[in-house]
Amino acid sequence: MKFFIDNIWLIALALLSGGALFLPTLQRGGARVSLLQATQMLNQGKGVILDIRDQDEFAAGHIRDARHIPLKDLKSRISELDKFKSKSVIVVCSSGAQSARAASQLKSAGFSEVYSLDGGLAAWRAQGLPTAK
């Protein structure tokens, strides 16, 4: 007990830093899908890709047959995706960081199966998977 009292600040610092390392995991939220799972969904016709990157990034290269709606326009253009409510929607951004925000917007709009692509387009390209221009 004396050890804990003598080192309370070190223990508090250790707990705080551990919590800070765990926080990004909690904030991601939403379902994530791996590259393998995403390609399986696409090959079976069960999924549709939604690319939320900016126009310039999308024009530089994107996943084949991806629908493009930039994140900043998603709220106003979400009705364009209504015909895909019965399919799995896989949201893609550059690195996987922003796609969770778009996924939560789609969930609140009534889409039942929404996933964020783990690692985003950077991971897709790193695995040598095909992109289109």
Image (tube, rainbow, N blue to C red):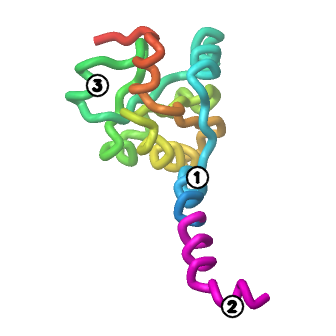
- Taking the magenta stretch, the answer to whether it contains residue 114 is no
Looking at numbered disc 2 in the image, what kind of residue is underneath it?
Ile
Q: What residue did someone put label 3 on? A: 58
Magenta span: predominant SS is helix
Looking at numbered disc 3 in the image, what kind of residue is underneath it?
Phe
In the rendered structure, the answer to whether residue 98 lies left or right of residue 30 reads left
| Residue at 69% over, 90% down | 5
- Taking the magenta stretch, the answer to whether it contains residue 14 is yes
Q: Which residues are magenta?
A: 1-18
Q: What residue did someone put label 1 on? A: 25
Q: How far, Cα to Cα, is label 2 from label 3?
A: 56 Å
Q: Is residue 54 above or below residue 42?
A: below
- Which quadrant holds the C terminus? top left
Q: In the orientation shown, which residue stands out farthest toward the right?
A: 1
Q: Residues within 10 Å of mark 2 (few under 14, many from 20)?
A: few
Q: What residue did someone put label 2 on? A: 5
* Residue 34, horizontal then vertical, whole percent: 60, 27
In this rendered view, identify the residue nearer to me: 79 or 91: 91
Label 2 or label 3, whichever lies nearer to me, is: 2
- Label 2 residue SS: helix
- Which quadrant holds the N terminus? bottom right
Q: How far, Cα to Cα, is label 1 from label 2?
A: 31 Å
In the rendered structure, the answer to whether residue 129 lies left or right of residue 61 reads right
| Residue at 75% over, 90% down | 2
Looking at numbered disc 1 in the image, what kind of residue is underneath it?
Thr
